[in-house]
């Protein structure tokens, strides 16, 4: 199995499994996007599919409610990364979420068969919203 992280990986699924048994699909069960690892840089783009088009205007003059809804259908961030063979840490330089900028996103890496890669993270540990996020990726669409 090729365990080279570099290259483009297309998203296959994204689940958040809560400790209380709930399973949530943040963008629904159908989504699209990719994560790309270069020599030192990375970028993530994930969207709900299909996205909800604006009906009140364009990118600058659509209603604020439509622009806010678009924010809830799109995840993007970019920066550098380190990979130790078991965990990958994304050093976030730019992000759609302002509070992530300058921070780190650490993920456990699990290699699957057939060119799959799963990135796993614990979120909100120690709270009633504690959960495990799983993003599964494949090199080819």
Image (cartoon, rainbow, N blue to C red):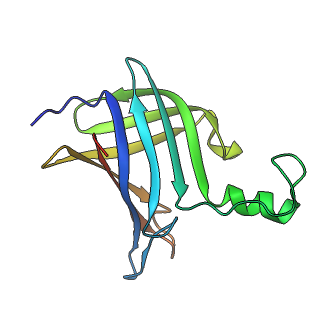
Q: Residue at x 62, y 33 (%)?
A: 102
Front residue of 45 and 18: 45
Please give left or right for residue 73 compared with residue 136 in the image: right
Residue at the extreme left of the image, as rendered:
1
Answer whether residue 134 is visible to the viewer in this image.
no
Q: Residue at x 50, y 62 (%)?
A: 124
Residue 83, horizontal then vertical, whole percent: 31, 29
Residue at the extreme bottom of the image, as rendered:
21
Is 130 above or below relative to 106? below
Quarter of the image for residue 121 reads bottom left
Is the N terminus in the top left, top right, bottom left or bottom right quadrant? top left
Answer whether residue 18 is visible to the viewer in this image.
yes
Residue 18, horizontal then vertical, whole percent: 41, 74
Residue 137, horizontal then vertical, whole percent: 32, 48
Please give left or right for residue 87 compared with residue 26 in the image: left
Residue 82, horizontal then vertical, whole percent: 37, 27
Residue at the extreme top of the image, as rendered:
39
């Amino acid at each position: 199995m090729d365990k080279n992280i570099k290259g483009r990986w297309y998203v296959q699924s994204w689940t958040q499994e809560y400790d209380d048994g709930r399973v949530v699909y943040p963008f629904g069960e159908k989504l699209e996007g990719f994560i790309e690892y270069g020599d030192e840089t990375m970028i993530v783009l994930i969207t709900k599919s299909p996205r909800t088009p604006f009906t009140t205007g364009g990118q600058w003059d659509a209603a604020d409610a439509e622009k806010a809804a678009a924010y809830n259908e799109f995840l993007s961030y970019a920066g550098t990364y380190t990979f130790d063979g078991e965990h990958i840490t994304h050093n976030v330089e730019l992000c759609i979420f302002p509070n992530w900028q300058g921070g780190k996103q650490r993920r456990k890496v699990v290699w699957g068969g057939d060119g799959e890669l799963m990135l796993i993270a614990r979120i909100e540990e120690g709270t009633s919203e504690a959960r495990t996020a799983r993003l599964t990726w494949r090199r080819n669409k």
